[in-house]
Structure formats: C-alpha cells, structure tokens
Amino acid sequence: MKKQKILCIIILIITFIVCYRLISNSFFKTNDTLPSDKNKVYELTAQNYTSVLENVHLNIDTYVGQKIKFTGYIYRLYDFEENQFVLARDMIVSSDFQTVVVGFLCECNDAKTYKDNEWVELEGEIVKGDYHGDMPIIKVTYINRIDIPNEEIVYPPDSSFVQTSTVL
C-alpha cells in the first residue's frame, strides 16, 4: 500500500509537469547573459518554491553549484540512503485542496538526527546526482530545526514566472 501511494505521488508530479509544459505557452528561455553569483545564497519562498523547483529539475546543468536556502519538512522514501531526505512542501493540486508532496532531494551527513515531518531550514548547494535518473540534489551545508511556518502550503508553478538567468 505504501509503495503504491509513493508511485502514485511520483506519477502525479510527472504528469503535472508534462501537462504544464504542454499547455503553457509562457515557458521559454531567454538569452540573458547575466552572470550568476555562485557565492550568493538565493532564498526560496512559498511564492516561488514550485516555479524554482520545476525550473531546476528541467535545467539541472544550469544550476549546478548554485547555493539555495529554503524551509520544509523532512520526508523520506523507502529506498533513500541514510543520509538522504526530501525537504518537502505540500502543493495544492485541486480545488478541493488535495495535495501532493514536492521538494528537493537533499543529502546531509547527520540526516538521521532529523525525524520525518520535522520542519527545518537549510542551506546547500545544487549538484547533479542520480535517483532513478538525473536529479538535482541539495548538498546540505547548514540545517536548523524551525517551527511550522505560517505559509506551509505551496501552489503549482506560476505561469508568470520566467527564468531569465541562472539567478534564482
């Protein structure tokens, strides 16, 4: 039952991304050549979370080395290594407030000290890794427990979000 639920969530996320790309005419890439500051830490918010998540997954190589900071709760799947977890958020996918889990796969040396569903803030660097295929992975450099934020739910990617450089 647990494996079926996990597979259903993964299929739903993939379906959502494919549908979004098929029906969205606003997804395009510009030739903006602004240099990215690889030393700057870019913060994800509840408002830009899924847009950035989608863009990084679709353009992994562009974001390798980028440092990010964001919050979420610890979420693990049965086949994760001991040092892995998803820093997750619940994304609303329907008008009756059905949600799916979305987030970045993270690797952290002391991951075992954090419990499932525990809220944390972390900073890390995006690397290209492998989890059932190419996947952006956040190598955690800082992690801290936090209280549940006021904005714990995120929404599907905003069609008005246009990535014009590697600056998040």
Image (cartoon, grey):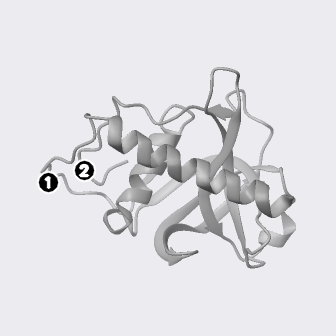
* Residue at left offset 73%, top offset 33%: 149
Q: Amino acid at mark 2?
A: Ser
Side (left or right) of 64 relative to 131: left
Question: Mark 2 highlights which residue?
Answer: 165
148 vs 56, left or right, is right
Q: Foreground: 42 or 135?
A: 135
In this view, 20 is above or below 124? above
Nearest the eye: 25 or 59: 25
Residue at 51%, 42% in the rendered image: 50
Is 106 placed left or right of 118 in the picture? left
Instruction: Tell me residue 126's x, y (percent).
Output: 47, 66
Amino acid type of disc 1? Thr
The secondary structure type at the circle numbered 2 is loop
Label 1: how many Cα within 10 Å (few below 14, some 14–19, many 20+): few
Residue ID for mark 1 = 33
Res 40 seen here = no
Looking at the image, which is closer to me, 115 or 160? 160
- What x and y, as percent, mark residue 86? 68, 59
| Residue 150: quarter of image | top right
Q: Residue at x 84, y 59 (%)?
A: 2
